[in-house]
Image (tube, rainbow, N blue to C red):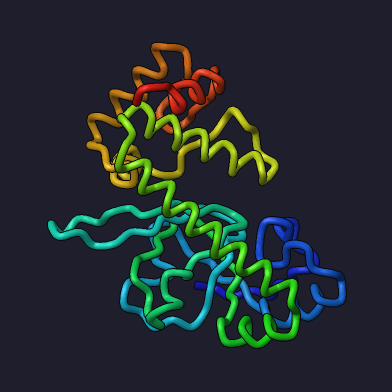
């Protein structure tokens, strides 16, 4: 892993990350907090479960998955993180990471030492508010996953997953209809609580019904409203 110098004030992801809504003077203070970037090669680990907690990581470029070991020894995917999102929040309560964070492609993160973040948050109230919003967002996302796994059929789960990805990518300036899946279908299945065969069959069904155009990992949303109707179908 290689570390690089970075400044939040000149980052084009600042409206998606910790400095949301900060004034220029406070942004300059934040530049002293986030002083380095770290590169993680595809397949490499940013951290492992059990590692001591020292910092949060803001994804600058690339894509990550978080996973935990399951009883059968296989990894259970718990989330996917892209540019502008934070990794490491799992470790705040126990001072050790509870999951592995693995790069799905060559990636780069900004290192945010947690002790310095806490100190600066006491000085810059807006930063504290921004961090609380991020924590709340993660709680809401966890609740969404629980609902996904607890009450939705396979078609609803995959439709929700695709809609969520396109919404997050659109917020980062990418196409709202075309995406390249950085994760495998097996990893999608692990996250959604579905078998690989079910994920592949559902993708094929969406393709045949004209909801998606699927070519290996390239996916184009052809009927966004159709996906939304599927998720919000009554009686399911």
Q: Going 48% across and 69% down the picture, which residue do you hit?
A: 89
Say left or right for 53 vs 20.
left
Q: Is residue 219 above or below residue 14?
A: above
Give x and y (percent) for residue 173.
70, 42
Give x and y (percent) for residue 196.
25, 35
- Residue extending farthest to the left is 72
Q: Is residue 190 above or below residue 208?
A: below
Residue 156 shows in the view? yes
Give x and y (percent) for residue 77.
33, 53
Residue 104 shows in the view? no
- Residue extending farthest to the top is 209
Quadrant of the rendered image containing residue 142? bottom left
- Residue extending farthest to the right is 24
Give x and y (percent) for residue 182.
45, 44
Say left or right for 212 vs 110.
left
Q: How many marks?
A: 0
Q: Is residue 205 above or below residue 123?
A: above
| Residue nearer the viewer, 194 or 141 | 141
Q: Name the quarter where the C terminus is drawn.
A: top left
Say left or right for 98 vs 181.
left
| Residue nearer the viewer, 155 or 34 | 155
Q: Going 86% across and 76% down the picture, which residue do you hit?
A: 25
Q: Going 13% across and 57% down the picture, which residue do you hit?
A: 72
Q: Going 33% across and 37% down the picture, which residue do you hit?
A: 185
Quadrant of the rendered image containing residue 194? top left
Say left or right for 55 vs 74.
right
């Amino acid at each position: 892993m290689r570390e690089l110098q970075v400044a939040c004030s000149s980052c084009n992801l600042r409206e998606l990350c910790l400095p949301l809504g900060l004034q220029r003077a406070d942004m300059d203070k934040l530049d002293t907090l986030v002083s380095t970037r770290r590169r993680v090669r595809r397949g490499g680990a940013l951290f492992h479960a059990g590692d001591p907690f020292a910092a949060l990581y803001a994804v600058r470029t690339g894509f990550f998955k978080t996973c935990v070991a399951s009883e059968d020894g296989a990894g259970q995917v718990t989330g996917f993180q892209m540019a502008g999102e934070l990794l490491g929040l799992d470790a705040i309560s126990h001072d050790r990471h509870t999951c592995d964070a693995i790069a799905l492609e060559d990636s780069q993160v900004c290192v945010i030492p947690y002790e310095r973040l806490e100190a600066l948050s006491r000085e810059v109230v807006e930063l504290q508010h921004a961090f609380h919003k991020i924590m709340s967002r993660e709680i809401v996302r966890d609740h969404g996953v629980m609902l996904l796994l607890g009450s939705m059929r396979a078609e609803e789960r995959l439709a929700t997953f695709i809609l969520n990805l396109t919404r997050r990518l659109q917020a980062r300036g990418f196409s709202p209809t075309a995406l390249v899946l950085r994760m495998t279908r097996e990893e999608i299945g692990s996250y959604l609580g579905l078998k690989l065969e079910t994920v592949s069959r559902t993708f094929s069904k969406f393709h045949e019904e004209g909801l998606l155009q699927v070519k290996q990992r390239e996916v184009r949303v052809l009927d966004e409203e159709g996906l939304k109707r599927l998720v919000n179908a009554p009686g399911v």
